[in-house]
Image (cartoon, helix red, strand yellow):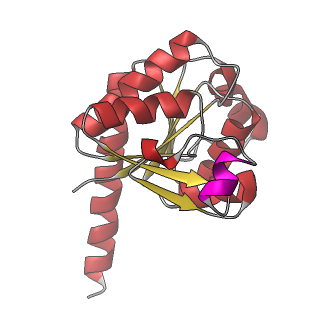
Amino acid sequence: MSYKICISGAAAGHSQKAKDLAQVIGREVAKLGHVLVTGATVGVSFEAAKAAKKAGGIVVGFSPAGSEQEHVGRFRLPESKHFDYVVYTKSGYTGRNLLMVRSCDATIVISGRIGTLNEFTCAFEENEIAGVLEGSGGIADEISHILEVAKKGKGKVFFETDPVKMVKEIVRRIRKEKKEKKEIFTEYE
């Protein structure tokens, strides 16, 4: 069974280290036979998408635009040729973020800025599995502190520094959660 794993990261202002980490994650997701989902944007998540495609994986993009013309023209985002499928949400960035995160089994946060924080908080508030790649820079290195200040616990958030271990742990947690949900639903049959 393949899972949908969202990659959230900075579209701009990211380091080479964050791009390299994203590429490792993209390859690992593809290598394990899972679907990589991104915001159909440039930057860190695009690096993960390119690496996943190169490794033979499937990549789905969720665009804030309502059409390919708006996606490329108004939002100045990459052409759809880099993705197997693009969902044109017609929801802007914040609407797209919620739809994208809710459509996935888990989210991985790499580096990031305010949009990445929004994607993370969508995952957190929806009680989704979220892995934060610490040491990747940006907002990812601040999330532990943000959770501490918010005083709402950690939910299903976990932290990792190794990108290969991150993907393996995300898959393990998704598998465990799906098994538990299946057992709950089976009880009511």
Quadrant the C terminus occupies: bottom left
Q: Position of residue 113 (x, y in %)?
A: 72, 30
- Say if residue 33 shows up in the picture: yes
Q: Position of residue 49 (x, y in %)?
A: 43, 36
Q: Nearer the viewer, residue 57 or 97?
A: 57
Please tell me how many numbered marks the rendered image carries: 0
Q: Is residue 149 left or right of residue 64?
A: right
Q: Is residue 1 left or right of residue 9?
A: left
Viewer-closest of 26 and 104: 26
The answer to which image quadrant residue 26 occupies is top left
Q: Is residue 80 above or below residue 52?
A: below
Residue 126 is at least partly visible in this image: no
Q: Which residues are magenta?
A: 68-73
Q: Position of residue 69 (x, y in %)?
A: 65, 55
Name the residue located 39 percent from the left edge and 18 percent from the top edge.
162
| Left-right relation of 99 to 35 | right
Query: Hey, which residue is sitting farthest top in the picture?
Result: 16
Of residues 134 and 5, which is closer to you in this image? 5
The N terminus: image quadrant? bottom left
Residue 52 image point, x, y percent = 34, 35
| Magenta-drawn stretch contains 176 | no
Give me the residue at 45% from left, 19% from top.
21
Residue at image coords 46%, 25% = 22
- The question of residue 70 being in magenta is answered with yes
Q: Nearer the viewer, residue 122 or 81?
A: 81
Classify residue 78 by image quadrant.
top right
The residue furthest bottom is 189
Q: Main secondary structure of the magenta part?
A: helix
